[in-house]
Image (spheres, rainbow, N blue to C red):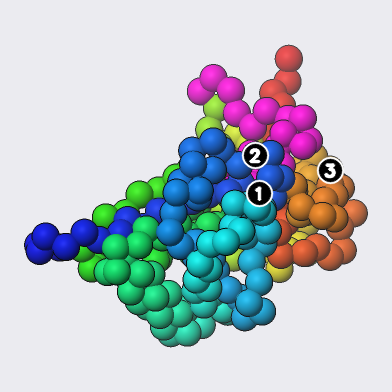
């Protein structure tokens, strides 16, 4: 932007995995100060992220950005373009916009696609980190994901690199695992690691549960699988 008009700032705010107590103090400050709260809308006009921020959304102008549950790239790009246009319309009027997103805005989040488009139009953008779901899941299980020089692999279940990722050293985290439970079970059983793998579903949300991956026959969208590092022989 080259003129002297005062434009709003776009904030991508991570609100954590579901437990409102995991909302950071910085996120709370940004949300209180923002003129507009934006949230992803998968089609029902509701947002789990807005539910987490609770009273912080009271009295705020709410902007729902389309976020269809599809893998159709053309539909997704159209939705991201539309959402960015809605956000930029607010920024042009000098209103700051805080987009609330589950977990962290930099990890497999719709926020990243919107951020790129808003930034390309010349507006100021900032990211506010949140607690990632896999960190909350590990905490719920009471396990340490990595120590010292140990690596940590994080992969979405839909990745074409899934099989390779599961063979890497150290702990492995598979996000959005529900759609490929059988595949995960088969691959890990082949590696002799199925017994140690744990499924955590809806961490921090209503209906949270954890169980051995080998016992899972179905799971909801917000499901994470944690495969601990292989223990070395003493």
Closer to the N terminus: mark 1 or mark 2?
1
Q: For mark 1, what is the residue?
A: 17
Q: Kindly report the distance in space between the C-alpha atoms of the residues bearing marks 2 and 3.
A: 30 Å
Instruction: Answer with left or right where residue 153 lies relative to residue 17.
Output: left
Instruction: Answer with left or right where residue 96 lies relative to residue 6.
Output: right
Q: For mark 2, what is the residue?
A: 22
Q: Which residue is drawn at 85% across and 49% down?
A: 209
Q: Position of residue 162 (x, y in %)?
A: 58, 57
Q: Where is residue 115 in the image (x, y as percent from the top left)?
A: 36, 61
Q: Kindly report the distance in space between the C-alpha atoms of the residues bearing marks 3 and 1.
A: 26 Å
Mark 3: few, some, or many residues within 10 Å (few <14, many ≥20)? some
Q: Which residue is drawn at 62% across and 80% down?
A: 43
Q: For mark 3, what is the residue?
A: 195
Under circle 1, the secondary element is: loop
Stretch of the chain drawn in magenta? 131-149
Q: Kindly report the distance in space between the C-alpha atoms of the residues bearing marks 1 and 2.
A: 8 Å
């Amino acid at each position: 932007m080259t003129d002297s008009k005062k434009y709003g700032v776009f904030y991508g705010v991570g609100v954590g995995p579901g437990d409102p107590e995991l909302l950071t103090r910085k996120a709370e400050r940004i949300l209180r100060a923002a003129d507009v709260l934006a949230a992803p809308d998968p089609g029902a006009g509701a947002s789990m992220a807005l539910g987490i921020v609770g009273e912080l959304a009271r009295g705020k102008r709410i902007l729902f950005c389309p976020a269809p549950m599809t893998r159709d790239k053309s539909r997704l790009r159209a939705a991201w373009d539309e959402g960015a246009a809605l956000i930029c319309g607010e920024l042009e009027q000098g209103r700051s916009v805080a987009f609330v997103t589950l977990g962290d805005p930099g990890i497999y989040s719709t926020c990243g696609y919107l951020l790129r488009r808003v930034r390309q139009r010349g507006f100021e953008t900032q990211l506010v980190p949140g607690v990632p779901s896999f960190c909350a899941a590990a905490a719920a299980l009471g396990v340490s994901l990595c120590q010292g020089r140990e690596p940590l692999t994080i992969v979405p279940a839909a990745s074409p690199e899934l099989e390779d990722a599961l063979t890497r050293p150290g702990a492995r985290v598979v996000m959005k695992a529900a759609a490929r439970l059988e595949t995960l079970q088969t691959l890990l059983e082949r590696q002799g690691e199925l017994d140690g793998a744990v499924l955590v579903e809806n961490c921090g949300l209503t209906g949270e549960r954890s169980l051995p991956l080998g016992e899972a026959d179905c799971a909801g969208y917000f499901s994470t699988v944690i495969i601990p590092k292989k223990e070395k022989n003493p």
